[in-house]
Image: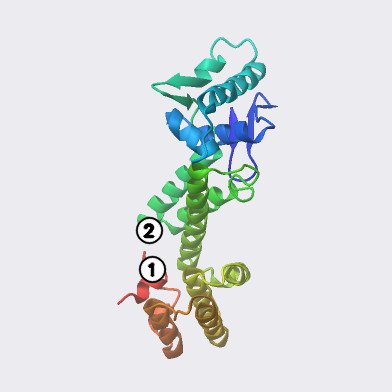
């Protein structure tokens, strides 16, 4: 089985899709996939599909959706005694469990690669960390579950995954900055700061990359742009850490040089 949720929902067995066309069974499959090899209680599945507006027939209808998914599994696996539909999509202790092999669901592979990247960075292996973070980010093929209607549980997962994706991107850029790749990062960081005009971490990385590339004036412009956006959108000033980074750029602080091998993110170098 091969399941992808980091982008459009895809689920195949032996090259045959098992994704239902109807919206609510798609939700059920997506939630079971995200929590693959874990028991999802029946009330959680019903909450995902109907929220607070649950019909009296919710339990019966949910059982119908599970039956539809099992029929799709049966058709894809064929007469395989090791993968009967009730073994793959199993009933367990008041809930259901989708049993898959390790690596079958892309979100689990992504989480594994991110954890490995973080461990490599903690060991000071920046090259390995950069490679692992790049591999993790390459698993994505668009916004998570972009073509699935999200109820309360899937929406939580969607937000978590998008935050994780941005965090992994920041940590990969931190590793690349420690490796002295500031020139190579400039175009990427310019696009990212435009896409995330209120994100201090990305702006800090862009400022440092510009400073190390001999473009101090442009780094100061990035700061002023963020400052203006924060004031206009939120009525806030940049954080104290970003203000200290700004002052460090003005003063030509040696802590900004590429030779600094601190394990901390850029902004953390300027914490009080």
Asked if labels 1 and 2 touch by Cβ distance under 8 angstroms, the answer is: yes
Residue 189 point in image, percent of width and height: 58, 69
Q: Using residue 45 as the reference point, say whether residue 269 is left or right of it.
A: left
Q: In the structure shown, which secondary structural element does the residue marked by tag 2 occupy? A: loop
Sequence-wise, the earlier of marks 2 and 1 is 2
Give 2 or 160, whichever is nearer the viewer. 160
In the rendered image, the vertical position of residue 248 relative to residue 194, given as above or below: below
State the image coordinates of residue 134 (x, y, percent, origin top left).
55, 53
Q: Which residue is mark 2?
A: 124
Q: Does any portion of residue 110 appear in the rendered image?
A: no
State the residue in front, 28 or 134.
28
Query: Mark 1: which secondary structure?
Result: loop
- Cα distance between the residues tagged 2 and 1: 9 Å
Q: Residue 26: which quarter of the image?
A: top right
Q: Is any part of residue 112 visible from this angle?
A: yes
Q: Which mark is residue 261?
A: 1
* Quadrant in which the C terminus appears: bottom left
Taking the spot 48% from the left edge, 31% from the top edge, the residue there is 102
Residue in the picture at 63% in, 39% down: 9
Work out which quarter of the rendered image holds the N terminus and state it. Answer: top right
Q: Nearer the viewer, residue 157 or 135?
A: 157
Residue at screen point 42% across, 90% down: 251
Figure label count:
2
User: As drawn, which residue projects farthest toward the bottom?
Assistant: 251
């Amino acid at each position: 089985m091969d399941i992808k949720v980091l982008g459009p929902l895809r689920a195949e067995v032996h090259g045959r899709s098992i994704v239902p066309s109807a919206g609510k069974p798609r939700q059920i499959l997506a939630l079971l996939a995200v929590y693959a090899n874990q028991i999802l209680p029946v009330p959680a599945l019903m909450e995902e599909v109907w929220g607070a507006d649950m019909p009296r027939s919710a339990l019966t209808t949910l059982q119908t959706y599970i039956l539809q998914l099992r029929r799709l599994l049966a058709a894809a696996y064929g007469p395989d005694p090791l993968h009967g539909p009730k073994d793959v999509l199993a009933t367990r202790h008041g809930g259901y469990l989708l049993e898959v092999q390790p690596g079958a669901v892309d979100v689990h592979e992504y989480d594994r690669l991110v954890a490995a990247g973080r461990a490599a960075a903690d060991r000071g292996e920046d090259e390995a960390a950069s490679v692992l973070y790049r591999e993790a980010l390459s698993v994505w093929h668009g916004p998570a579950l972009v073509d699935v209607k999200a109820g309360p549980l899937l929406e939580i997962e969607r937000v978590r995954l998008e935050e994780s994706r941005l965090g992994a991107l920041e940590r990969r850029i931190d590793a690349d900055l420690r490796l002295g790749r500031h020139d190579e990062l400039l175009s990427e960081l310019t696009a990212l700061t435009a896409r995330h005009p209120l994100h201090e971490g990305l702006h800090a990385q862009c400022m440092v990359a510009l400073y190390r590339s001999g473009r101090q004036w442009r780094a100061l412009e990035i700061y002023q742009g963020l400052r203006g956006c924060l004031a206009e959108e939120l009525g806030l000033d940049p954080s104290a850490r970003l203000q200290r980074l700004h002052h460090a750029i003005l003063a030509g602080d040696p802590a900004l040089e590429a030779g600094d091998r601190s394990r901390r993110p850029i902004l953390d170098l300027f914490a009080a």
